[in-house]
Amino acid sequence: MAARVPPALGAAAVLVLLPAVPALADEIQERHVWEEVDRGEFDASDAEGHVTRLDPEGHITRLDPEGHVDTLEDTREEGGETVISLSTDVLFDAYEWEVPDSAAHRLEELVEDVPDGAAVSVTGHTDSRPTGDHVDFDNQELSENRAEAVAEVLQAVRPDLDLEVSGVADQEPAVREVEDEPETFAQNRRVEIAYDSG
């Protein structure tokens, strides 16, 4: 018959042996590894299958900023006029018409070369998508308000200019809109500043 160990004595033995368990485990593992090496069972060439070599060229994405940065304006000559087309996606927040202070200086630079006292038209344009129920205005009002906001900045920096301000919503698109090509809609959302090239 097996001898019975009183519970208190068993608990005391466990408490005495517990600190030795991690050291014992390390010794067993170390002995096992070195025994394998001593017996020639460990081959350094086996490590090749467990090492991942990193080729940085395959993991680096090179960014060409020219293809990824939207510019505020595009300037062109058209029918004897200089037309500065401002992207409203860059200039304004969605469904907004307040010109940020950071853009006012750029607008001033854009009209530096306009002749003194020139007649300048400022026309707001939108895409053909309705504004939706979440706002209480339509594309016509949005285009007018954006043109007016740009004109206010121009009037402040160039009070000599004779400004004619209007909004035409989606009635004069720059490009034909294609449903699965969002950039075509973006190109139509703009405010155009036009003056005689003289």
Image (cartoon, rainbow, N blue to C red):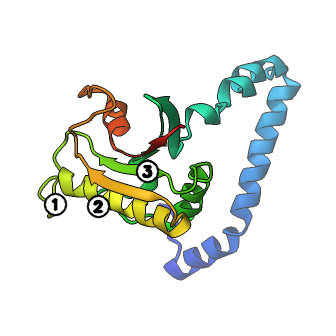
Q: Nearer the viewer, residue 155 or 34?
A: 155
Instruction: Give the left or right position of residue 195, taking residue 177 as reference.
Output: right
Instruction: Give amino acid for label 3.
Output: Val
Which residue position holds label 2? 145
Q: Is residue 141 above or below residue 73?
A: below
Q: Secondary structure at mark 2?
A: helix
Q: Residue at x 34, y 61 (%)?
A: 148
* Quadrant into which the C terminus falls: top right
Q: Secondary structure at mark 1?
A: loop
Which residue position holds label 1? 137
Q: Nearer the viewer, residue 197 or 17?
A: 197
Instruction: Give amino acid for label 1.
Output: Phe
Q: Tell me where residue 102 appears, x and y as whole percent.
A: 56, 64
Is label 1 or label 2 in front? 2
Mark pair 1, 3: CA separation? 26 Å
Q: Residue at x 73, y 64 (%)?
A: 20
Is label 2 or label 3 in front? 3
Q: Nearer the viewer, residue 42 or 118?
A: 118
Which residue position holds label 3? 120
Is label 1 or label 3 in front? 3
Q: Within the image, what quadrant is residue 17 found in?
A: bottom right
Marks 1 and 2 in Cβ contact (< 8 Å) = yes
Q: Tell me where residue 168 appears, x and y as whole percent.
A: 23, 46
Instruction: Give amino acid for label 2.
Output: Asn
Q: Is residue 151 above or below residue 186?
A: below
Sort mark 2 into few (<14), some (14-19) or many (20+) by Cα contacts within 10 Å: some
